[in-house]
Amino acid sequence: MNIKNLAKKFNYYQNAVYFSSANHQHRYFGFGKSDEIISNDVEEINNWQIKQTVPVFGGIPFDKQHLDSNLMNGYFIAPQYVIDEKTGQSWGKIPQVDSQIQTNHLNKIISSINDVNWIARTTSPLQEMLNDQKKKKVVLGMQKTINLDYPLNLDKLIISLNKHQPNSYHLIIKNNDEVFVSATPERLIRLNKSTIETAAVAGTTNRDLNPKIDQQLANDLKHDIKNLHEHELVVQEITNKIANLAKLDYPDEPKILKTPQVQHLYTPITGVLKQQTNLLQLVAALHPTPALGGIPLDWALSQIKNTELNPRGLFAAPIGYVLPNGDGEFVIGIRSLWEKQRTVKLFAGAGILAGSNLTQEAREIKLKMSVMEDLIKEQLHE
């Protein structure tokens, strides 16, 4: 069964999931609901997962702040049927359809509300970093609200993700009238038997249609003091968090990771576990990385709570899947949206350091947010 036929099945089920790896090795679809858990407790989720006979999909919220949602506060689902479209492997049985959703409508934006005064609100944590060298970084997000005439067409969205974001991870979790979508370049952790893979992604610049200019932007990024410093902080914190769990290996200098909108400094980190550790324990050890929280962490989390207007929920949080054998992969829910009853919230963020230019950082956030905005706008036209 090909991706178009599987994507169309999203119109027939109240519960459905989709996860595609950035390296194109796996593309999971899941339909129906065999079991679910609403929790933000890693141990509770792990005890639930080990009882399942199919892959489970979901996310652990960024922090303990609560949203009016069954999905955004911590949610995992065991579908009735899961298939890896790339390998053909499947689990469970195809469930009866719930109902067919009408999808031949032409959607339109009813209203749009931007995050206001972001620069003014961000001035305070920036000043704290200028005054105290121990306060090194905080990642501050921006949210935008879009009200639609109809719910998002998820089968079209899946096709659009593969067309426009081919080298990113794709994740969609549909739970009744709620949907979470992410097209993220950032892996948190992958576990394959005793081998782990994670990555530091921090430091950003623009793309350009001219290949020579685009390459020059990449070269400039690799030599930019501010971005290199931000990236090194993230590498150090990630490796420090899991050095006691695994023997790690990573290059001395970062590479360039390109997405259609921006390019990042990127350091792949691999390792072999020193002791038996399950995937969710690794997630808990790593989250939140400095790429989404900050340094020192407690100070950064307080700044995020005080500066951002809304709780993050699954935005910038660990989202992914666990196979019945315990292997799996989690990514970080950035370049993302959450839809509930035709109201869509978009999220993107930027790392703020003492030397940051807030106007430039705000532009970077809007560029990152355009990933999801463009996908929505594509549904306004046939």
Image: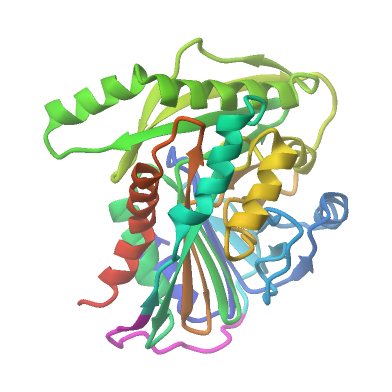
Q: Main secondary structure of the magenta part?
A: loop
Q: Quadrant of residue 3?
A: bottom left
- Which residue is drawn at the image coordinates 72% and 54% (left, top)? 63
Report the front residue among 143 and 148. Answer: 143
Report the front residue among 380 and 141. Answer: 141
The stretch in magenta equals: 96-111
The vertical placement of 266 against 307, above or below, is above
Res. 7 visible in picture = yes
The picture places residue 351, in percent across and down from the top left corner, at 50, 39
- Which residue is drawn at the image coordinates 36% and 82% (left, top)? 111
Quadrant of the frame with the N terminus: bottom left
The picture places residue 344, in percent across and down from the top left corner, at 47, 74
Report the front residue among 315 and 130. Answer: 130
The vertical placement of 258 against 359, above or below, is above
The picture places residue 231, in percent across and down from the top left corner, at 50, 25
- Which residue is drawn at the image coordinates 60% and 61% (left, top)? 82
Quadrant of the frame with the C terminus: bottom left
The picture places residue 166, in percent across and down from the top left corner, at 34, 46
- Residue lying farthest to the front in this orientation: 131
Residue 101 lies in the magenta stretch: yes
Position of 12 compared to 110: left or right?
right
Position of 365 compared to 291: left or right?
left
